[in-house]
Image (cartoon, rainbow, N blue to C red):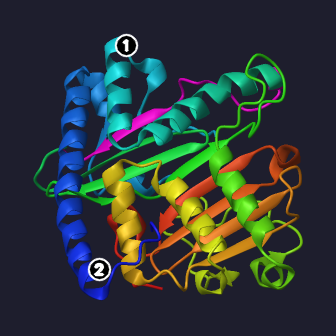
Amino acid sequence: MRGIKPSLALATLGVIGLALAASAVVDRSANQMAASANRFLDALDDEAKSRAVFAFDSPERVNWHFIPRPRKGLPVKDMNSAQRALAFGLLQSGLGSSGFLKATTIMSLEQVLKELEKGSGAVRDPELYFVSIFGQPSDKGQWGWRVEGHHLSLNFVVNNGKIVSATPAFFGSNPAEIRTGPRKGLRTLADIEDRALRLLQALDDGQKKIAVVADKAPPEVRSAHEPQPPAEAPEGIAFAQLNDTQKPMLRALIESYAGDMTAEVGQAWLDEIEKAGVDTIKFAWAGPGERSQPHHYRVQGPTFLIEFNNTQNGANHVHSFWRNRLGDFGVPLAAK
């Protein structure tokens, strides 16, 4: 996804080299995850461990959501300082620097909501984020882990020392922009909103007629809480219909999402996209082309689905995800 067009021979060699390199580094990331998970578990007493650990085949593993609700797992609130540090070490093992900053900022926004709502909304607590381990962390066999709470759901599966799934990967932000107080102006997910807006604004009138699929944005992302992504065919304008200025803009948007994961996982996603072919990737927009108005977009290819929604609270409340159209949670589906 870098826009480089080498010769066919070099491209073939490059793909082989990337595949070998990606395999090696994903192995290293998987080893780091296992080590981080085991350090975390070793710091827990039996009671805490009984709350944090589930069988790998437990239905809880695919019971994901991003709303404030009762959850299973061990919340940060019930950890001591050493356990918290190790829990955040596990979180960091699955994310790049930008993703880790987003995740921890999302947690901190619960305090902002608490102050804004003054007790009128759901329970807001920056410590109500839960760590769950599925199976025994190891370089043999299957295991997985999740960190989840309001506006955050990160799910990983490791099989025989390789990361085989890092989806669903959900990040949300409420408020999308802090408009008052000492953190005024903070926009946690600005990159994935602004890059999409710039791409939309770069389209000519004919292209916009293809890309804008609805005058009004839908109220929510699709398939929230579902264990697999929506199966509908992609809509919008195809990558092949963009010009040489617009194509890098769509690539940059996709790379913003991939860049939130570890470099190894993000590159594996991008390599998978390249292998499947980029020309059929479609970008679809719904709603006005203004950040201040409710808006929604999707980017969909054979292997992945990105969805972004900012319609609630006067277009100041973001939900976004990356999902694998070949199968979330490491459960294979037929390619669509």
User: Mark 1 — residue?
Assistant: 80
Residue under the point 55% across and 43% down: 152
Q: Amino acid at mark 1?
A: Asn
Report if residue 173 is visible in the image.
yes
Mark 1: give few (<14), some (14-19) or many (20+) Cα within 10 Å: few
Q: Nearer the viewer, residue 225 or 245?
A: 245
> Which mark is nearer the camera, 1 or 2?
2
Q: Is residue 110 left or right of residue 277?
A: right
Label ID, residue 286: none
Q: Nearer the viewer, residue 53 or 22?
A: 22
Residue under the point 59% across and 86% down: 240
The span picked out in magenta is 117-136
Position of residue 282 relative to residue 92, above or below, is below
Horizontal and vertical percent position of residue 274: 40, 76
User: Mark 2 — residue?
Assistant: 11
Q: Quadrant of the N terminus?
A: bottom left
Which secondary structure, mark 2?
helix
Horizontal and vertical percent position of residue 70: 56, 37
Q: Nearer the viewer, residue 266 or 303?
A: 266
Residue 10 lies in quadrant: bottom left
Position of residue 271 relative to residue 23, above or below, is below
Pointer 1 or 2: first along the chain: 2
Horizontal and vertical percent position of residue 296: 75, 63
Q: Amino acid at mark 2?
A: Ala
Residue under the point 82% across and 26% down: 117
